[in-house]
Image (cartoon, helix red, strand yellow):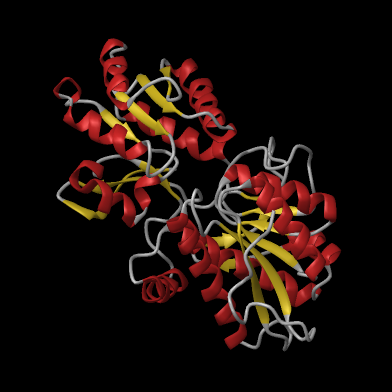
Amino acid sequence: MSTPPSPPGAERTDGSSVQIGALVPLTRPGWVEAGRHLLAGLELAVREVNDAGGIVGRPLELVVRDTAADPQRAAAAVDELARLGVAALAGEYHSVVARAAAARADALGLPFLCSSAVLDALTEQPTEWVARLAPAQSHGWQIYADFLLSAGHSRIAVAAESSVYWASGARILRDYLAPRGGTVIELDMRALTPTAVCDELVGNRATALLLLVGHPEPAASIVKSVRRDQRLAEIMMGAPAGQPEFAEWARLLGDDGAAIPFLRYLPERLSPLGARVETALRERLGEAPSFVAFEGYDTVAALADVLRSQGADRAGTAESWPRVAVEGTRGQIQFSRTPGISVWQWAWTPIQVVDRDPAEPDRFRILYAG
């Protein structure tokens, strides 16, 4: 599949720059808002690296490719970027897309630092070529399950679409909650309308509904249906995948979108570096940065550290993952081998369960921290 050209100035052919290929969802059906925040973080960090002298005197440059949430398009982009001679790959938000990119990067011997995707099995087999900043889905979603239990929820319905990511999330919740007295009731969104979801919730006596579905639809329609059903006035809705993080959620749903807890990968208080980066990202985005923007910044910070010591040598970069020790916006970034995870993993970024405050939907409340 063809990929759109990168933005003007993103590619140089005179050999003087060190190039990083950036995989980002910038068009539908990709989560465009997440992609915009991810790219803002990547670009800000590149600018700061270059302001500080680049990579041993050579400018760092991004070669951006839009994945549009399409695994085949992402794999084709990895092939193209490898031919262009990039030193490494960065980015990607969607787990299923990142998995396709990681498989190609592994096959080609191209280092890939994945920013945001959480699927545990990012590659089928253990690989030296891929590292990840975001916490594995099993780690984050088990913390979310602990939050549900602490809030008194044991009959939990999940409205789930069909994908590897959503199926993995439902399995993690079911396996973790069952021995702790919790029951997970799966509602197949291929067969149910939002109104029918409400009837299922009543019939199953669920006290919580988790939205394991795409954004904006069908997530927004389900939220509206549940909010308008008087039988479900007491039910808690949750979105562990983070749909309410972005401003589009509040614009679409207003007050209906508040009090829906989700996972966010930020510390309770930002470090001085984090606070400075937050200010710069806010200026760049024209709105409060999401945790995804911080993931983008931290990706380049970690890669730049490796490239300064290894140059653009791909094998040297891959061999350097266990030696990374970089101050990121959310803590000290180091990679290790984690049981059950096939890639080099930062274990772990700070994790919070937060929601939008019903009294002030632009403000987030921290409900639980892991």
Q: Dividing the picture into quarters, in which one does residue 56 lie?
A: bottom right
**Residue depicted at 56% across the width and 35% down the height:** 165
Give percent across and percent down for residue 321.
74, 59
For residue 201, which quarter of the picture? top left
Task: Report the side of 286 relative to 251 (left or right).
Answer: right
Q: Is residue 110 left or right of residue 354?
A: right
| Vertical relation: 289 (above or below) 44 | above
Residue at point 50%, 40% (across, down): 140
In this rendering, position of residue 136 left or right of residue 235: right
Q: Is residue 129 left or right of residue 100?
A: right
Residue 111 location (% of width, % of height): 76, 59
Residue 144 x %, y %: 42, 35
Q: Residue at x 85, y 63 (%)?
A: 315
Image quadrant where one finds the C terminus: top left
Q: Residue furthest top?
A: 203
36 up-or-down from 48: above or below: above
- Residue 214, compared with residue 300, is above or below; it is above
Q: Nearer the viewer, residue 215 or 311?
A: 215
Is residue 332 in view? Answer: yes
**Which residue is nearer to you in this view: 307 or 159?**
159
